[in-house]
Structure formats: C-alpha cells, structure tokens
Image (spheres, rainbow, N blue to C red):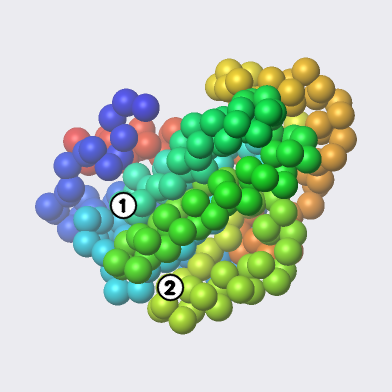
Amino acid sequence: MQNPIAALPRPTDPTTSNTAAKVIEQSLDAVFDNPPSIKRTAFLNRAVDAWRVRGQEIARPTLTLVGGYAGSGKTEFSRFLSEITGWALLDKDSMTCAMAERLLTSLGGDLHDRHTELYLREVRPLEYRCLMETAFDNLHVGTSAILAAPFIAELADADWICRLTDRCAAMGVDVAVIWMSCDIESMRRHIEFRSAARDAWKLANWGTYTSGLDIHNIPATADIAVDNRLGAAIDLVKQTRESLKQVLT
C-alpha cells in the first residue's frame, strides 16, 4: 500500500488538523452500520482523539477486535484504523501463518488446511493464543492494539467476551468489538484477489463453505458493525485516504 496516511506529515495548523479529524469522523460514521450507541460513539471519539495526538499514547489504551468471515475486508479496514490512530496492528495470518503451516506439516496434515478437525483442534487455539498474548504485551506497556482475525467462535461465545472484557478492565483497558458485514460475492472476489494458498479449499468447495456462513446476522457481542457489502466500506476508506492526503499535503 503506497503513501499510507501515517506516513504523511503531521499538520501544525490546528485548522488543518481539525479538518482532517472531521474527515475521519464522517468516514467512520458512514461505514458503521448499526444504530448509534454509547459504545459506538465512544469508539468513534477515541479513534478521532487518537488521530489528534497520533504518536502519543492516550491515557487509557484500547483493544479493538476486527472480526468477520474470510474476504470480508478485516485487514484493509484494520490498516485504515491503524493509520489514523497509530495503534499497533496485529493480523492473525501475518503473525501465525508460518507457525501454523509448520505445525500442520509436523502433525501429518496439509499445511494449507484451515477447515479439518486437525486444524481446529490442534492449531487454531494456538494461533489465537499467540495473537491475544501479543496484544496483551502491547497493552501492558500502554500501547493500544487492533486485532484482525475472523473471531467467529469467539464472538459467538458471550462468556469469552466477558472474560476478555473483565481482564482488560482490570488493566484499565477499553475493549471495542467490530464486525465486518459483507456479501458472498464480494468475499469471493476479495479471496480470489489475494490468492492465498490457505484459501484453496474454500474456493474449490465454495458452496459447501458458504452454506455454513451466517452473513445476515451480526454477532450479539459486536459493539460496531461495518457495512462492507459490495465493498462499500473499503471504497469509502480509499476515498478517505485520498481526501486526507489532499488536506495534509
């Protein structure tokens, strides 16, 4: 990705900074699909505040989970959040793919397996453990973190979210859970475009794979839903990047 927002110079003129902050606020408000709520408003304000003081961690860190099905736009949206806030971006695939492939091979499985009982039982729990513990390493030193991962099982488990929220509250950390809503056609297009070997089974068995997806319902544990049907949210993110570049350069 060329010329990310984070690479642009920080505005020294308060008027320019306020204009940029307004662009960010309007963009996030436009992609959030669920009705306004206290948690949604608090997260939007926290993200905009982080833009204003980017490079300086604010007093209370935030742990943001960005979940959704494969190809829903999690990574791209998480990058955008990281660019505007300066919060650490932890992507599960980037962090654990090499480990997962080596472990699957050592267990006699397919290194690209992401759907069999072997992967779900022996590998997936370790991937999420690595992701979460790395997040807490950041949070312990006051650095906010954005986690990009499906979180399908986790967001379906209210007890898991409750335990996470309690652990964070004890550390003085806020938690925000974002769900990427997307349509089947857009997800397939995104998966085909990234050409990742781990997606081969999904594409070869598309009907079987998608029959198990509940794309019409947002997990009850999600605080914020992002409407990325037909790529709407990601298109708006790209437009916002361009608008910010014009404001800041």
| Quadrant hosting residue 182 | top right
Q: Residue 122, image x and y in percent?
A: 67, 45
Q: Is residue 170 left or right of residue 212?
A: left
Q: Name the residue type under label 1.
A: Gly
Q: Residue 208, image x and y in percent?
A: 86, 29
Q: Name the residue type under label 2.
A: Val
Q: Is residue 79 left or right of residue 40?
A: left
**How far, Cα to Cα, is label 2 from label 1?**
16 Å
Q: Residue 212, image x and y in percent?
A: 84, 40
Q: Nearer the viewer, residue 98 or 106?
A: 106
Front: mark 2 or 1: 2
Quick check: can you spot residue 49? Answer: no
Residue under label 1 = 86
Q: Which residue shows up at 35% across the image and 60% down it?
A: 138
Q: Nearer the viewer, residue 234 or 133?
A: 133
Task: Report helix, strand or loop for mark 2.
Answer: loop
Q: Nearer the viewer, residue 29 or 206?
A: 206
Residue under label 2 = 173
Task: Report helix, strand or loop for mark 1.
Answer: loop
